[in-house]
Image: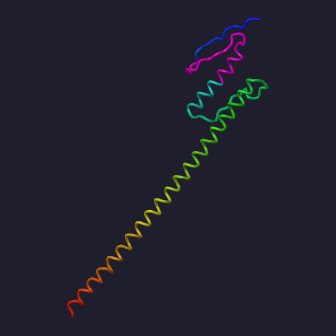
């Protein structure tokens, strides 16, 4: 039995579709659905899943693998966002602490300058009294 060569056609999102002509439209439907979901993932939509993942064949294995991959990507993105928010909150806390420290240092410097001024006046007045 001789197999037919594969047919390559273009899809609207720019992907090349490689399907054997004897499989008909059913195989093409899976490929087109997968390509559409990949395009949505590329646009940042990680809430996609292919519908053929419930099949009990190689196509279903492909679908389950794709759905797991998207699920892991979504989890990784969510974890990265959570860590980023934690880092921002920590940076804000440190900025507030820095402002408090700067204010405290300013107040201490003002008090020390006042004390130094009084000591200088007292010292110079004692020097004149002798």
Q: Nearer the viewer, residue 99 or 58?
A: 58
Question: Horizontal and vertical percent for residue 39?
Answer: 58, 27
In the image, is residue 45 above or below residue 103? above
* Quadrant assignment, res 9: top right
* Quadrant assignment, res 102: bottom left
Question: Horizontal and vertical percent for residue 59?
Answer: 73, 23
Residue at the outermost top position: 2
Quadrant of the rendering where the N terminus is positioned = top right
Query: How is the protein colored in the picture?
Result: rainbow
* Quadrant assignment, res 62: top right
User: Measuring 37% from the left and 70% from the top, which residue is drawn there?
Assistant: 106
In the image, is residue 66 above or below residue 79? above
Residue at the outermost bottom position: 130
Question: Horizontal and vertical percent for residue 75?
Answer: 64, 42
User: Measuring 39% from the left and 70% from the top, which residue is drawn there?
Assistant: 105
Say whether residue 89 is left or right of residue 31. left
Which stretch appears magenta? Answer: 11-33
- Numbered-mark total: 0
User: Measuring 56% from the left and 53% from the top, which residue is drawn there?
Assistant: 86
In the image, is residue 109 above or below residue 33? below
User: Measuring 57% from the left and 49% from the top, which residue is drawn there?
Assistant: 83
Residue at the outermost right position: 56
In magenta stretch: residue 27: yes
Say whether residue 48 is left or right of residue 14. right
In magenta stretch: residue 32: yes
Quadrant of the rendering where the C terminus is positioned = bottom left
């Amino acid at each position: 039995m001789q197999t037919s060569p594969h047919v390559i056609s273009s899809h609207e999102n720019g992907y090349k579709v490689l399907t054997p002509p004897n499989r008909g439209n059913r195989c093409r439907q899976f490929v087109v659905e997968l390509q559409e979901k990949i395009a949505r993932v590329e646009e940042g939509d990680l809430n996609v899943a292919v519908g053929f993942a419930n099949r009990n064949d190689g196509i279903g294995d492909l679908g389950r693998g794709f759905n797991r991959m998207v699920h892991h990507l979504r989890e990784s993105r969510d974890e990265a966002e959570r860590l980023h928010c934690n880092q921002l909150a920590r940076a804000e806390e440190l900025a507030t602490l820095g402002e408090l420290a700067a204010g405290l240092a300013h107040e201490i410097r003002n008090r020390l300058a006042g004390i130094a001024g009084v000591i200088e006046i007292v010292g110079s007045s004692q020097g004149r009294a002798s």
